[in-house]
């Protein structure tokens, strides 16, 4: 007996299906890319303002639309946007290699594609912090396109949890610059005598570079600022006080809205004048003809931006108006360590962040209380504990070596040919 199917009742055209997302905007101005995509305000203004409308009003609305675009761009820090762009590009490259559909912006990426991508990240041994950044990049790209994000799927969250349990979340980080190493790095970069104004360009340039790099190493260590904050400091962010130097930071990683915080760096004792970051900074600003831009106590600012604290030097021995790059900070740290005679293994483990990690590690080794260290580093939670890294403790061996040297008859060098002398 043939079963006759019941006639289906068509759904009304204007009635949404169960679970369907209905756009709030009218069809004639619905933004492309999905109901949650960023609206095109310029198109909205053109569609709503008639041709005979006040031209001044239309221009003003267009200017407001441009302001909205600026605010949207400022919602994330430049470093965050760069990480999102890099993470999304890596995900696109994975999909292209295997012919998998990305989906965005037309539709959301399939959950299965994201799962396979996470599995490949697990095989490459990439740090879990980087995996979290890649997941955030995929989520951000879907939010921009107004599409549901596959990274919020329970399956993906379980996969992420399994990866953390399998591979662990420990992050080694770059090595910290210790105080003895900092002293050796500064000692290996002596400042030549102040050249005559008529000296050759190469002589003036070498003098300026030496002063700037000493300021970079000492202030970068004792201020404990992040490399993005360090290269963004302008001279009028510095205030010279009786006790020392005050640095006022605006935006930072933990202060995206720019409430600001101050870092006070006192003068070092006279016996440590060569290691004083305040004196090194003032010497650099004096040579670069920038000391006059130091902020006064009331921090009166003019409409013209002050020059950056750290900037490049031209071949002609002139100070550039542009700030140094973060990459140069890292290069200076590595080069100074190499000049101090450190082996390649030590140099390779250093980076720009090693200065910030150095002051955190040294302060903890000196039994400075954690809240005070956290205030210097600008931490808002328990992040300061990551700088409680192992510091060199070779005192036992130093005592033992001293005893051996004091008792040469007890332990003698092996006869030639029976042991290798390194």
Image (cartoon, rainbow, N blue to C red):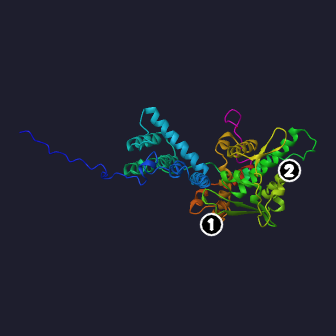
Residue 399 x/y as whole percent:
70, 54
Residue at the location (68% across, 36% down)? 420
Per the rendered image, the range of residues in magenta is 407-421
Residue 8 x/y as whole percent:
19, 46
CA–CA distance in space, label 2 to label 1: 37 Å
Q: Residues within 10 Å of mark 2 (few under 14, many from 20)?
A: some
Q: Which is more N-terminal, label 1 or label 2?
A: 2
Residue 402 x/y as whole percent:
73, 52
**342 or 168, which is in the foreground?**
168
- Residue with the most extreme front position: 52
Q: Secondary structure at mark 2?
A: helix
Residue at the location (51% across, 50% down)? 44
**26 or 124, which is in the foreground?**
26
Name the image quarter holding the C terminus: top right
Residue 412 in the magenta stretch? The answer is: yes
Q: In which quadrant of the rendered view does residue 101 lie?
A: top left
Count of all numbered marks drawn on residues in the image? 2
Contact? badges 2 and 1 (CB < 8 Å)? no
Name the image quarter holding the N terminus: top left
Q: In which quadrant of the rendered view does residue 224 lie?
A: bottom right
Say if residue 406 shows up in the picture: no
- Residue with the most extreme left position: 1
Left or right: where 378 falls relative to 106? right
- Which disc is residue 84 wearing? none
Residue under pointer 2: 287
Above/below status of 94 relative to 263: above
Residue under pointer 1: 371
Left or right: where 376 falls relative to 93? right
Above/below status of 207 relative to 233: above
**58 or 246, which is in the foreground?**
58
């Amino acid at each position: 007996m043939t079963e006759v199917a019941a006639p289906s009742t068509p759904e009304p055209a204007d009635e949404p299906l169960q679970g369907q997302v209905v756009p709030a905007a009218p069809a004639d101005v619905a933004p492309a890319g999905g109901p949650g995509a960023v609206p095109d305000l310029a198109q909205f203004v053109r569609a709503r303002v008639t041709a005979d409308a006040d031209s001044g009003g239309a221009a003003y609305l267009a200017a407001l639309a441009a302001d909205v675009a600026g605010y949207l761009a400022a919602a994330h820090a430049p470093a965050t946007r760069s990480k999102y762009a890099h993470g999304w590009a890596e995900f696109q490259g994975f999909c292209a290699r295997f012919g998998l559909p990305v989906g965005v912006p037309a539709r959301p990426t399939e959950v299965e594609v994201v799962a396979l991508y996470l599995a490949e990240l697990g095989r490459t041994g990439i740090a879990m912090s980087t995996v979290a950044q890649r997941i955030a990049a995929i989520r951000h790209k879907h939010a921009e396109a107004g599409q549901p994000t596959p990274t919020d799927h329970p399956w993906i969250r379980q996969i992420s949890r399994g990866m953390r349990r399998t591979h662990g979340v420990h992050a080694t980080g770059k090595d910290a610059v210790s105080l003895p190493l900092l002293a050796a790095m500064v000692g290996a970069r002596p400042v030549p005598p102040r050249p005559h104004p008529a000296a050759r360009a190469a002589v003036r340039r070498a003098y300026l570079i030496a002063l700037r790099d000493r300021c970079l190493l000492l202030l970068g260590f004792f201020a404990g600022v992040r490399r993005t904050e360090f290269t963004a400091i302008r001279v009028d962010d510095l205030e010279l006080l009786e006790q020392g130097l005050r640095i006022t930071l605006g935006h930072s990683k933990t202060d995206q809205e720019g409430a600001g915080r101050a870092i006070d760096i006192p003068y070092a004792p006279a016996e440590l004048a060569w290691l004083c970051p305040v004196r090194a900074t003032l010497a650099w600003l004096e040579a670069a003809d920038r000391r006059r831009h130091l902020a006064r106590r009331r921090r009166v600012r003019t409409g013209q931006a002050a020059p950056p604290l750290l900037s490049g030097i031209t071949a002609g021995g002139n100070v550039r108006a542009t700030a140094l790059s973060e990459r140069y900070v890292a290069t200076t740290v590595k080069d100074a360590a190499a000049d101090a005679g450190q082996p390649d293994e030590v140099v390779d483990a250093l980076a720009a962040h090693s200065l910030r990690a150095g002051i955190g590690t040294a302060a903890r080794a000196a039994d400075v209380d954690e809240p005070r260290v956290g205030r210097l580093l600008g931490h808002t939670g328990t992040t300061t504990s990551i700088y409680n890294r192992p510091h060199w403790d070779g005192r036992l061996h130093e005592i033992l070596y001293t005893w051996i040297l004091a008792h040469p008859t007890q332990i003698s060098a092996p006869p030639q040919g029976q042991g290798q002398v390194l």
